[in-house]
Image (tube, rainbow, N blue to C red):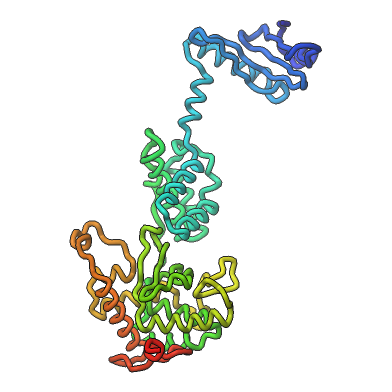
Amino acid sequence: MPRFKFTTTSLSRHLTAPQSGAQTVVWDTETRGLGAYCGKTGVASFFVHCRVAGRQRKTTLGRVNEIAIADARAKAAEIMLAASQGRDVEEERAATARSRLSLADAFAEYTSALQRKEASPRTLSLNEHNWRKMLAPYGTRDLRTLTRREVRAWHESWGQIGPTAANQGARLLRAIYNYADRKLADDLPTSPCVAVEFFKERGTRRVLSWDELPGWWDKVVTLGNPVRRVYWKLLLLSGLRMSDAATIRWEDVRGNVLRRPNPKGGRGRAFDLPLTLQLRTVFAEAREAAERLHQGSPWVFPAESACGHVTNMRELKAFPGVWPHDLRRTYATACAEAGIDPYTIKLLLNHALDRSDVTSLYVRPSAGHVAAAAQKVADFLETKVQGTSSPRSVVSLGAFDMHEASAA
């Protein structure tokens, strides 16, 4: 095999595609162990050949037309020095690669864990949205290389999107890192997210006052779209979260209860909401509206949307200051003022139990008790909608009368 000092000229002269055999191989006279080969396709590459702990090792350094000769010599010298010390550079690099954990890989593992726990589609969708919007550009980064300074800088830059979005991005990064620390890696440093100073979020946590409620209800019953009209009524009279209400199917309305199979928290948090007299009337009106506008739809609140049901519910013209979750807080307030005990309120709202409160883990109200409580709250809300001190015998919901419908 030819040996000569590697130069651009000498390599172009001697390193050519083989006339016979598998490869043309040449060696550099300036750097021990450095060679180059050219296959039948004419592609030439540098390599270094050494012996590590009695074993032959051949390492390709890069293509001749892509790496400078000086760089090839430097890499070869580094590998040869390590070999003389009994170190296998290739094995060290492979071990480093095996232990490397990218942010993207950690996010994928974290998402898989949430799916195994049957996390709600909304949680998974929100995580995916925040990943694409804020974290994906850093997906190739090794978790071990993330610093507190840059994570804090990321959070501050995300603040240009909005304080709530920035905080969501930081919380997602913290959750990914903590999961990786618990489940995927043995030697991660302290989470760099400890350096994040979360923005103050402008949450109004509004509750409709009892003086406001009759006027708001009057605006609801005059909405032009009957599906949207009934949807808002359901929010007030059930206390459901926006997504839980929007995704009700007719198959979920089962006898005396409304089944919510996949609420916030995932399938493990599935629950049944008692159907009060008022809710029965709401669903009767919803059935008429759905059949009139979207006959045959499986959704209680169908719409011309990609998912087939109502989404992004706000009434910017009729009552721009009211959000769906305001009605959930209003319902919770009605529960308290109607005299419902805190443990039953948690069940009606499907709130997680406080595990530091041992008593809450013991109390298991019966279905009859919860149903009676739900009816008491619905009656209380009926009086507030009417602006009276006690329910009338009939309250008009637009298309049906609630007590007449329940008796039918």
Q: Is residue 87 left or right of residue 269?
A: right
Q: Position of residue 164 (x, y in %)?
A: 45, 61
Q: Quadrant of residue 238?
A: bottom left
Q: Is residue 50 above or below residue 163?
A: above
Q: Quadrant of residue 309?
A: bottom right
Q: Is residue 81 above or below residue 193?
A: above
Tell me what residue is drawn at x 52 percent, y 70 percent.
312
**Towards the viewer: 224 or 167:** 224
Q: Position of residue 94 (x, y in %)?
A: 51, 25
Tell me what residue is drawn at x 44 percent, y 43 percent.
149
Report the quarter where the N terminus lies. top right
Q: Is residue 107 left or right of residue 178?
A: right
Q: Position of residue 239 (x, y in %)?
A: 37, 74
Q: Quadrant of residue 337?
A: bottom left
**Towards the viewer: 187 or 145:** 187
Tell me what residue is drawn at x 40 percent, y 59 percent.
267
**Towards the viewer: 383 or 5:** 383
Tell me what residue is drawn at x 34 percent, y 91 percent.
387
Judge whether residue 157 can be spotted in this image.
yes
**Towards the viewer: 138 or 228:** 228
Q: Position of residue 34 (x, y in %)?
A: 64, 12
Report the quarter where the C terminus lies. bottom left
Judge whether residue 206 can be spotted in this image.
no
Q: How many marks?
A: 0
